[in-house]
Amino acid sequence: MRVEKYSVGILGTNCYLAVQEETKETVVIDPGGCPGKLISHIKEEGLKPEAILLTHGHFDHIMGIDGFLEEFPMPVYVHEADKDAMNDARLNQSRTYTAGYTFPDAEYVKDKEKLALAGIDFEVIHTPGHTMGCCCYYVPSEDILFSGDTLFQNSVGRTDFENSSTSALVRSVRERLFVLPDKTLVYPGHSGETTIGHEKMHNPYV
């Protein structure tokens, strides 16, 4: 599996392409925007987007959905606890920064659910805190974690939103993520990559 990272949307969210190199089937993680250059790249490389995975329902992770679906019809997955955020422009913060955006057609996943997409096996890890429906997607075969806004390099996601909880986030990181192998490579929703081992040693927030 190859991972490609792109900064998209007005807050520079990390959008990832998880590419199955043998078939070029691709999973899109957190399309906070849909820049034309990225769509052109996908087409030029012959990539085949098969699904969109959302780590949570905040606007800066979802506002590119429609643009991708216009080019590549595919299912969109998000944790069931963020259903309200996907359908409420106030809760997902889009009304604060834009004219407002919702996406009511997502498919909802549960904690520990396994998703076989594009020839890649993802495990859903529910990590409430930043939102109560935050989740991470773990690929055991590659020791890779897409952590969204739960865990950053030397930091964690904000918890000053209506549907946030600092205590829940700390528990999520300690009890759900720090049990993964230290070598697990973490691809966060913002900033650079890190590893579980590094964060266990150096993250001052948990």
Image (tube, rainbow, N blue to C red):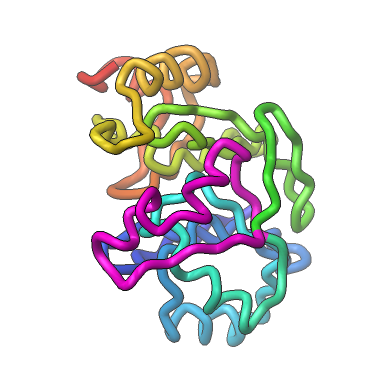
- Quick check: 177 above or below 101? above
Q: Position of residue 30 (x, y in %)?
A: 49, 56
Q: Residue furthest left?
A: 204
Is residue 17 toward the left or the right of residue 63 in the image?
Answer: right
**How many numbered marks does the figure carry?**
0
- Quick check: 71 above or below 170? below
Is residue 182 toward the left or the right of residue 107 in the image?
Answer: left
Q: Nearer the viewer, residue 168 or 124?
A: 168
- Quick check: 110 above or below 51? above
Residue range highlighted in magenta: 76-105
Residue displayed at 60% across by 60% down: 104
Location of residue 168 by image quarter? top left
Is residue 120 toward the left or the right of residue 126 in the image?
Answer: right
Location of residue 27 by image quarter? bottom right
Q: In which quadrant is the C terminus drawn?
A: top left
- Quick check: 203 above or below 118? above
Residue displayed at 46% across by 17% down: 178
Q: Position of residue 164 (x, y in %)?
A: 35, 31
Q: Position of residue 120 (x, y in %)?
A: 73, 48
Q: Position of residue 25 (x, y in %)?
A: 72, 66
